[in-house]
Amino acid sequence: MAASAWSLALCIGAASACSGVVLEEQDHGEWMPTLRIELPIEGGTDGAPELSQHVELAASAVSGSIDALEYEFGELQASWSWCRVFENGARGVGRFGVGYATYDFEWSGSRPTEFDIRGLSLPIGAAAEFPFGGAFEFELRGQLALVLGEDIAQSRHLEAGVGWNVADGVTVLLGWRWWMLEASALDDPVFTSVDLDVDGPVLTLRWRR
């Protein structure tokens, strides 16, 4: 339901924009460095010791070029998360939060221009972690975010990777992320919309208290 509402908002924004360039591109193999810090709000209770709440601080970035388009994405987020730990050590997490996002485009096509989106980010997401081999884990994550500024955008992440617990509370994860962005330019004289799908290796450093 939420995804449908956000997609509708993007369609309305695109329809109201002036006639211009519509870019639909895909880029592959770009590195995406990520940092995550998880701080506990409260531990489990006597009735449900397997449940806990956390604040997650996260930063992600990617840059690259495809055809005549150069781009840079950056996201800073603070999320409130609920975590359930199962008997086998697996974790299920749901979260929502607030943040700041910036998406910069430079197009050197027939009508060279720059198109920047900066604004409030409202992410929701979920994750699952499955431990194996003592110091290792397999992780799946997904996120959907609406970005509100002078223009409007919808950002989606899907990610799968393997983590190595290198020290108490410190994990290094290596995986693959699909980062999909749909943006509508409400007032830009050149761009109407951008639909860019980027996938590539993601290297994450996570510190969990």
Image (spheres, rainbow, N blue to C red):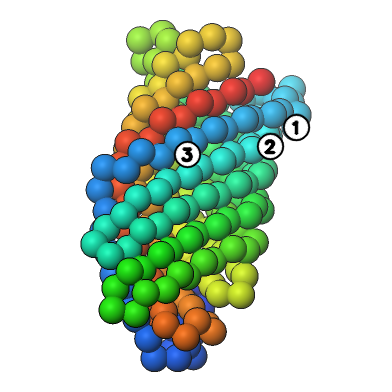
Marks 2 & 3, CB-CB < 8 Å contact: no
Kindly tell me whether residue 131 is visible in this rendering.
Answer: no
Residue 127 vs 173, above or below: the answer is: below
| Comes first in the chain, label 2 or label 3 | 2
How far from the left and from the top, in percent, is residue 151? 55, 74
Measured in 3D between alpha carbons, the distance from the residue under mark 3 to the one under mark 1, in whole angstroms, is: 18 Å
| Label disc, if present, on residue 41 of the rendered structure | 1
Q: Is residue 28 left or right of residue 33?
A: left
Q: Residue at x 43, y 10 (%)?
A: 135
Tag count in the figure?
3
Measured in 3D between alpha carbons, the distance from the residue under mark 1 to the one under mark 2, in whole angstroms, is: 7 Å
Q: Residues within 10 Å of mark 3 (few under 14, many from 20)?
A: some
Query: Depth check: 173 or 196 in front?
Result: 196
Q: Amino acid at mark 2?
A: Val
Q: Residue at x 63, y 54 (%)?
A: 100
Q: Amino acid at mark 1?
A: Ile
Judged from the image, the secondary structure of the residue bearing numbered disc 3 is: strand
Q: Amino acid at mark 3?
A: Ala
Frontmost of labels 1 and 2 is 2
Q: Residues within 10 Å of mark 1 (few under 14, many from 20)?
A: few
Residue 169 vs 70, above or below: the answer is: above
Kindly tell me whether residue 155 is visible in this rendering.
Answer: yes
Residue that badge 2 annotates? 55
Marks 1 & 2, CB-CB < 8 Å contact: yes
Residue that badge 3 annotates? 127
Q: Residue at x 38, y 35 (%)?
A: 202
Report the quarter where the C terminus lies: top right
Q: Is residue 136 left or right of residue 66?
A: right
| Comes first in the chain, label 3 or label 1 | 1
Residue 31 vs 142, above or below: the answer is: above
Judged from the image, the secondary structure of the residue bearing numbered disc 2 is: strand
